[in-house]
Amino acid sequence: LKQIDRMKKIAAPVARGKTIKFHFPQPVRSGQRVITLKDVDHAYGDVVVYRGMQYQAERGQRTVLVGPNGAGKSTLLKLLAGVLPVQHGVRELGHNVRTGYFSQNRIDVLDASHTVLESARDMPNPVSEQTARTVLGSFLFRGDDVFKTVSVLSGGEKSRLALVRLLLDPPNLLLMDEPTTHLDVGSIDALIGALKQYHGTLIFISHDVHFIRAIATSVLHVTAGANRTGSKLTFYPGDYDYYLDKSKATSARTALTASRN
């Protein structure tokens, strides 16, 4: 027995496949054309990111943005969200479209005086306390964690809370930049479960191949262009494996940041 006591306790691995048993609220249905960017230019000083860029998303698409780092994926997401103003060209929302943008740097929208539980229920149509606690638990807020005030949360905790709020009051155009960064395996699967239920339009950036394979129904490759010409967009009307096949990628992970052949 003494020998057993001296043995290190090894935590059992968390199994995938446990999804939250909850029907997430659904957004109001949008028109078929959800958002359009027409002849859009964007530059940071002398560095041209986009010139004459054209893009249109349609209702129900779940599109992942891929391409080399620095090509303009996050810039495109911010242009779509209206976080960055269009310097030239047109950003046009479709009928009845409401956007929601998630990124690690957008946690300032939380009310610092709220508790975690209050924040999760501070909605036009709040869910019950039990439902809120169930969803929060799936995103690592367990037990008395729900009574912490937002002001004492870490950056990662605030990020998870902002994610919960989006899922409990979803817009019909959801734009997400690396949503799995502060999540564990179980929480990623809870997010996958929520997004598979989601009836709106999703455009996102991720480096989690498991998450992308589970969620994406189309791929948009952003190719870095030479300065003054801007990056180019190539749409693949199929899931991530379709993109891997069509782009002749050598591996699923490197294809996330590969230049287009």
Image: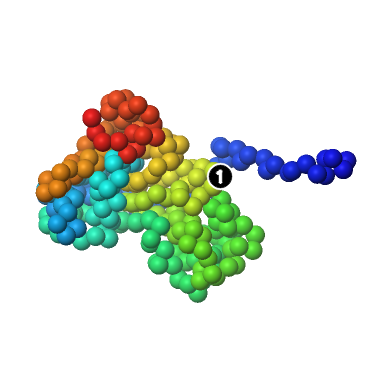
Q: Position of residue 46 (x, y in %)?
A: 14, 57
Q: Measured along the vertical axis of the image, is residue 37 above or below residue 16?
A: below
Q: Measured along the vertical axis of the image, is residue 143 above or below residue 4?
A: below
Q: Residue at horizontal 14%, vertical 48%? A: 227
- Name the quadrant containing residue 47: bottom left
Q: Residue at horizontal 51%, vertical 71%? A: 151
Classify 10 Å Cα crowding around label 1: few (below 14), some (14-19), many (20 and above).
some
- Name the quadrant containing residue 104: bottom left
Left or right of 85 on screen, residue 10? right
Q: Position of residue 29 (x, y in %)?
A: 32, 49
Left or right of 249 on screen, residue 140? right
Q: Please, what is the three-letter code of the amino acid marked with disc 1?
A: Gly
Residue 229 can be seen, yes or no: yes
Coloring scheme used: rainbow
Query: Which residue is tagged 1?
Result: 186
Q: Position of residue 256 (x, y in %)?
A: 34, 37
Q: Position of residue 76 (x, y in %)?
A: 25, 50
Residue 235 can be seen, yes or no: no
Q: Residue at horizontal 73%, vertical 44%? A: 9
- Name the quadrant containing residue 6: top right
